[in-house]
Image (cartoon, helix red, strand yellow):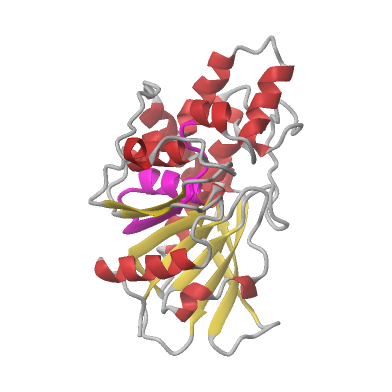
Amino acid sequence: MALTDMPIEELRSYRPEVPEPPDLDDFWAGTLKAARGAATGPATYEPVTDPAPATVEVFDARFPGWAGQPVAAWLILPRGLPRPLPVVVTYIGYGGGRGLSTEHLFWSAMGYAQLVVDTRGQGHDTPDPDPVPFPQLTYGFMTRGIGHRDHYFYRRAMTDCVRAVDAVREHPDVDPERVIVSGISQGGGLALATAGLARDTVAAALIDVPFLCHYRRSAEIASEGPYPELVRYLGQHRRVDPAVVFDVLNHFDGLHFAARATAPALFSVGLMDPVCPPSTVFAAYNRWAGKRADITVWEFGDHAGGWGSQPVEQVRWLAERGLSGAR
């Protein structure tokens, strides 16, 4: 992937005009109120003993998400450290689920609890029983339910992410004042959305190469990944008005969630990213309304950004903000 987006000097000041839907706050307030009202009980946590790592306790969690539907997660707690613990809530990239608990041991090694949230319909443990799946899942999750904002896939997925924060804050081993949301790609976009929608309960956000930002430009210039699904959908459904589709997407744009955030954030971007173009990442970063936003720029990074180097940057950044893991 060659450097085909803007020069870094232009990216640092890139603030496109993307008008918000006038009903955005009401739409999301009603959505979250309905989800919370549909819950029939608290989250549950079942101990996992196969395998049983020596350094952590693992729990198979279920919490009520969209429409009260159960969402799966792993809760991973480091052994032998003083509690309550700061917690990193992790959202997953496009097409993936929570996977195996043994894939998620970095944050516990750094002294944090971690809640790894399954993505509905994408993992193996959380179905997506949308009552009105229009259009059918032909192009991918990017276009599922795109005919109307009420049925769009990311309305349900983002609601689940906020409800994950609601749930983990009630766990007795977690410090409710030190909840950190995190994710890469789709997970980064979901972390960004959660930071904007649950701004009173999120202490910090770690947002890596985020998806779900600046949809129109993303559809126009992304050469790989989910955004081309929009191009295929609109190209083949020529009677569908693109303006209607992008109005639906505008209710789920990370630019608007960034403008509502209050916590500090650390973004990352790869300047040679063909999936989430750098300009779409900077468009969200430059709108961040929280206490502080920083960004790690990987000059020759693709969609993997800084690979394993970025978590090291995150640990240092959190420590600077008084959000170190337990020792």
Above or below: residue 235 compared with residue 7: above
Residue at the farthest top position: 239
Magenta segment boundaries in residue numbering: 188-214
Q: Is residue 51 visible?
A: yes
The answer to which of 70 and 241 lies nearer the viewer is: 241
| Residue 195 forms part of the magenta stretch | yes
Where is residue 218 shown, x and y percent of the image?
53, 32
271 relative to 103 in the view: left or right? left
Quadrant of image for the N terminus:
top right
The answer to which of 314 and 66 lies nearer the viewer is: 314
Could you tell me which residue is drawn at 67 percent across and 31 percent down?
A: 229
135 relative to 29 in the view: left or right? right
Find residue 149 and report its image quarter. top right
The answer to which of 147 and 104 lies nearer the viewer is: 104
Quadrant of image for the C terminus:
bottom left
Where is residue 133 shown, x and y percent of the image?
70, 31
Where is residue 30 shown, x and y percent of the image?
43, 33
31 relative to 325 in the view: left or right? right
Q: Is residue 38 visible?
A: no
Where is residue 140 shown, x and y percent of the image?
70, 37
Count of numbered tags: 0
| Residue 158 forms part of the magenta stretch | no
The answer to which of 300 and 55 lies nearer the viewer is: 300
Find residue 311 and report its image quarter. bottom left
Residue at the farthest front position: 2
Could you tell me which residue is drawn at 51 percent across and 25 percent down?
A: 216
Could you tell me which residue is drawn at 41 percent across and 79 percent down?
A: 111
